[in-house]
Image (spheres, rainbow, N blue to C red):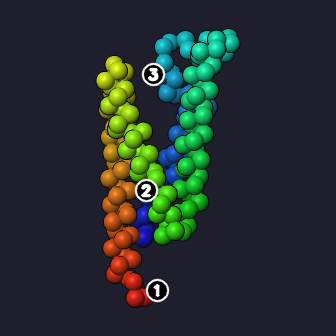
């Protein structure tokens, strides 16, 4: 159970960090968007503002999930559906999306790094769920 609790805390904190990086630092826009996008947004360009607003919305989504993981880490045995949801999100918005972006010609290094990050989150999440299930089965009579 400890591994699941700590997985939720670490991934939750990482998600909250991502929220700040996306919404305030705007690192994804700086790294991936055409040069000058933030300046265009500040000048009122509607397409550039839409891009910035979309990243902020995505950052909020990731932040909310992170806060949910952190709050639920106190009761990990009751938050298993949340953990499966995060693993599903990581799988589809992770390597699947990253491969799509690579296919579309975006920065290889950025998306290769993200494939590794997403894969580590998925693999360690599955491992934590397995250890939790084994722990619950071995302690089933002790509840």
Quadrant position of the N terminus in the picture: bottom left
The image quadrant of residue 140 is bottom left
Query: Is residue 103 shown to the viewer in this render?
Result: yes
Do tag 3 and tag 2 residues touch (Cβ < 8 Å)?
Answer: no
Of badges 3 and 2, nearer the viewer stands: 2
Tell me the element at label 2: helix
Of badges 2 and 1, nearer the viewer stands: 2
**Image coords of residue 70 (percent x, y):** 56, 57
Residue 84 image label: 2
**Residue sitting at the far bottom:** 141
Distance from the alpha carbon under mark 3 to that under mark 2:
29 Å
Relative to 101, is 76 above or below? below
**Image coords of residue 48 (percent x, y):** 59, 16
Task: Report crowding for label 3: few under 14, some 14 to 19, many 20 or more residues within 10 A (C-alpha).
Answer: few
The residue wearing badge 3 is 32
Residue 143 image label: 1
Of badges 1 and 3, nearer the viewer stands: 1
**Label 2 or label 1, whichever comes before in sequence order:** 2
The image quadrant of residue 38 is top right
Distance from the alpha carbon under mark 1 to that under mark 3:
51 Å
Residue 1 image label: none
Distance from the alpha carbon under mark 2 to that under mark 1:
24 Å
Query: Is residue 39 shown to the viewer in this render?
Result: no
């Amino acid at each position: 159970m400890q591994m699941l609790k700590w997985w939720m805390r670490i991934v939750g904190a990482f998600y909250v960090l991502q929220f700040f990086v996306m919404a305030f630092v705007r690192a994804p826009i700086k790294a991936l968007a055409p040069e000058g996008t933030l300046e265009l947004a500040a000048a009122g360009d509607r397409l550039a503002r839409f891009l910035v607003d979309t990243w902020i919305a995505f950052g909020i989504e990731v932040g909310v999930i992170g806060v949910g993981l952190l709050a639920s880490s106190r009761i990990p045995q009751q938050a298993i559906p949340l953990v499966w949801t995060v693993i599903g999100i990581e799988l589809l918005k992770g390597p699947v999306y990253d491969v799509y972006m690579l296919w579309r010609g975006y920065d290889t290094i950025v998306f290769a790094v993200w494939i590794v990050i997403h894969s580590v989150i998925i693999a360690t999440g599955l491992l934590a769920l397995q250890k939790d299930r084994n722990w619950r089965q071995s302690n089933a009579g002790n509840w």
